[in-house]
Image (tube, grey):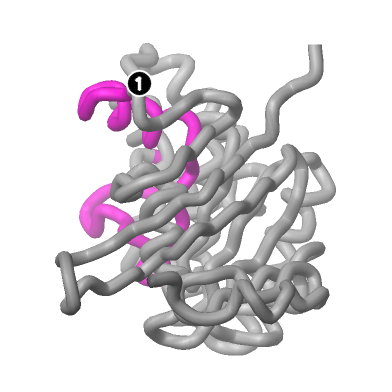
Amino acid sequence: MTRPPAIKLEKVRKTYGAGDTAVHAVAEVDLTIDHGEYVALMGHSGSGKSTLMNIIGCLDAPTSGRYLLDGMDVRRLDEHQLSVVRNRKIGFIFQSFNLIPRTTAMSNVELPLVYAGLGRRERRERAMEALDKVGLADRRGHLPSQLSGGQQQRVAVARAIVTDPVLLLADEPTGALDSHSTADVLDLFDELSLSGRTIMVITHEQDVGDRAQRLTRMLDGRIVSDSGKLAPVAFHGIAP
């Protein structure tokens, strides 16, 4: 049996308000991302990329349309089921790292496995394996304050991959990093992509977008180009 796409959006729309004051943050978006793809989603402030990211990350629900995550219709899930999906099927990577300050790198990486109910021994083994993949096994006992920004983001990446998720979803992952640390993190994304990981990076930085295999751009709530190929002019602007 053919595996369904990692992500499939069908005419997804997100509208805030109603009537003349309605804001169509996302308007009639169709998007398919297959397993193993490395995609960058770009757009200026107000383009809709953050709203779309929240929908893809199951942090927000579309007003209309359908979202399938690894073949699963997200609309059919209740809040508890969505929480489980976010923990097990999506690995989040944020600009601000979101590490627990007084907790070691190892314990930070273990956290999703604690929520998943795994035993201590298995948690330790999997967290150590994830830290080794990002080159920080020797820093497992360090607190975030004892790590550089680039190292903290690597810990965050290890935490994101420890559950072996369907999707790595990175929101401006290099926004708080210097150029050297940015290059290190992007090299790590390259390695993860080569190993078969599905990655979606939301960014406004062109050099970050250029590292992805596929570049998708948003404008006024719509996808206007994909991998550099412009969408038809009729798709520009906001639908009534």
Does the magenta-highlighted stretch encompass residue 177? Answer: no
Q: Which residue does the image show at 37% across and 64% down from the upper left?
A: 51
Along the horizontal axis of the image, is 44 left or right of 223?
left
Along the horizontal axis of the image, is 231 left or right of 108?
right
Q: Which residue does the image show at 32% across and 15% down from the upper left?
A: 117
Quarter of the image for residue 18 reads: bottom left
Q: Which residue does the image show at 46% across and 38% down from the upper left?
A: 66
Quarter of the image for residue 41 reads: bottom right
User: What x and y, as percent, mark residue 160?
Assistant: 49, 44
State whether residue 110 appears in this view.
yes
Give the answer, above or below, for where 48 lies relative to 177: above
User: What x and y, as percent, mark residue 79?
Assistant: 21, 29
Q: How many marks?
A: 1
User: What x and y, as percent, mark residue 97?
Assistant: 38, 63
Q: Nearer the viewer, residue 196 or 227?
A: 227
User: Which quarter of the rendered picture does the C terminus lie within?
Assistant: bottom left
Q: Secondary structure at mark 1?
A: loop
User: What x and y, as percent, mark residue 176?
Assistant: 44, 81
Does the magenta-highlighted stretch encompass residue 91? Answer: yes
Boundaries of the magenta span: 77-106
Q: Nearer the viewer, residue 145 or 178?
A: 178
Along the horizontal axis of the image, is 103 left or right of 233?
left
Quarter of the image for residue 154 reads: bottom right
Q: Nearer the viewer, residue 14 or 123?
A: 14
User: Which quarter of the rendered picture does the N terminus lie within?
Assistant: top right
Residue type, mark 1 in image: Ala
* Residue that numbered label 1 is attached to: 116
State whether residue 127 appears in this view.
no
Q: Which residue does the image show at 67% across and 47% down from the upper left?
A: 32
